[in-house]
Image (spheres, rainbow, N blue to C red):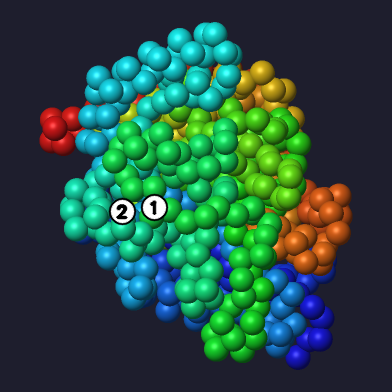
Amino acid sequence: MSEEKCILSLDIGTTSIRCFIYNKSANIIGRSSLPIKMIYPDDQAVELDPKTLWEDITSVVKDAISHAGVQSDMISAMGISTQRATFTVWDKITGKPFHNFIGWQDTRADHFAQSWNNSYTMKAVRTVSRSIYAVSQKSKFLAAAVIQFRAQHVSMRMLWFLQKYPNIKPLAEQGKVCFGTLETWLIWKLTKGKEYSAEISCASATGLFDPFISEWSSFFCRLLGIPKQMFPPVKDTSAHFGKCDVELFGAAIPICAAVGDQQAAMFGQCCFGPGDLKLTIGTGAFLTLNVGVKPHASVEGFYPVVGWKIGSQVVHLAEGSSNTAGNAIEWLKSMNLIHNAPEANTIAQSVQSSEGVYFVPAFNGIQAPVNDYLACGSIMGITQKTRTPHIVRAVLESLAFRNMQLFESLKAETSLPMNRFVCDGGVSASNLVLQLTADLIGKEIYVQSHSEMSALGAAFLAGLHVNYWKNQNELKTLVHVRQKYVPNAQVSADYKRVLSQWWKAAKRSMRWYEEEKC
């Protein structure tokens, strides 16, 4: 048994639950993981069963502690990183959930988003906000002037939920209902109901939190008819969230950080300064820019989220996403075009081009800057000469194309210089995707030696709270570059026509589901 103090990090991503035990050098000394069991009641639905999720989480934590060979009382702190905008609602007295978790990829609320975006009410809100912004030049009014609801926002899925379960709203108005994204529910479960609070970075990703005043938005709650009474108090990212019940793991492990997975990866990458840029390519792809101390009001659909709050220090981020990335590679596997994810890179590089085949990564629509949730995934340009490597290459190339699209749009709407560009996530193992991304955007991309950046970020935040690590400068000494991708201008020039054709294919995939959904 090790006598060294350590930090435990619990990372609940889109597809897996992972737990890591870190030592003082930020090396992993224990680990465990299980896949997340997702439920698909219909084509647009993505749900998780709370009971199964809880059982798997506790199992993974126990296994990681055992694998590390440490006593649970040697764990100085626990940090939690979670997928964001996945939520559930439960009875405040009994603790029983009213329904499964509704996943962030669930698009059943798309018609609510469309209806609200096109409503006279929202047109009036935008017009008034635009007028106030013209006079005040305050960013919060610019944000309101260009706001577009998305199915990903908790606000829209909450409207769908309240319509499906009409008995919940009266209970919520009476204060008998608890709302929680994953970190809130998990902290509540770990402390056996003693701690009920949200964390600011996760709250900021719901569409119901106002990052300009750091509070749940009374305006949008009233506008949408969502009872504000159901929302929990909001805490800093690095803070005391109570202690794990001693019966769970044999010690009352203090919970000292909670954070959204993308913000956690940003912190783990030590992207502490304005202009630092992080690309995470996992199940989805997320391009996140540190914009400093003020929220970013986007006109292209880059969501303003809080990165982290530590005491009086608040860091804001601008974030764009693609829902389809690593899951496109999993799709290749399910179609028996590849046997495993690493093989995709090898097969794709066995040919010089996709030979006119184009893949549109839109399993759940196309996000910023296109923002079309009715687009469909598609393959175009298939001929009798098309072979498996051409399709595999088209899929990997499309991920780089979306990365470039996100980068160019984010660059165009911000005045910040783009500084350090880092990448993480499972798909970052594909040198074809990363090299092509670097070529197309014309910037060097760095991949760090640590591969589990969300978990590392949560560990760093928890460790700082208990002084396990002294400050952010010390954290920078613990993260090292493993690989650097240098852009090739000639490749970028050679891909101009390919990009043009891919964009043509993407346009043909747009609004595909309009008739069916309306």
Residue 357 picture location, percent across and down: 36, 31
Residue 137 picture location, percent across and down: 58, 14
Q: Are marks 2 and 1 in contact (CB under 8 Å)?
A: yes
Q: Alpha-carbon neighbours of circle 2 within 10 Å: few (<14), some, or many (≥20)?
A: some
Q: Which residue sits at x=57%, y=13%? A: 136
Residue 383 picture location, percent across and down: 27, 32
355 or 345, nearer to the observer: 345
Which mark is on residue 1?
A: none
Point out the image quarter for the C terminus.
Answer: top left
Q: Which residue is mark 2?
A: 173
Quadrant housing residue 23: bottom right
Image height of 57 relative to 502, above or below:
below
Earlier residue among tags 2 and 1? 2
Q: Which residue sits at x=39%, y=48%? A: 228
Point out the image quarter for the N terminus.
Answer: bottom right
Amino acid on which disc 1 is placed: Gln
Residue 453 visible within the image: no
Which mark is on residue 229?
A: 1
Q: Which residue sits at x=69%, y=81%? A: 68
Residue 378 picture location, percent across and down: 29, 36
260 or 507, nearer to the observer: 260
130 or 201, nearer to the observer: 130
Question: How far is mark 2 from mark 1, CA to CA?
Answer: 6 Å
Amino acid on which disc 2 is placed: Glu
Describe the element under mark 1 as helix, strand or loop.
Answer: helix
Looking at this view, name the residue that lies furthest to the front: 174
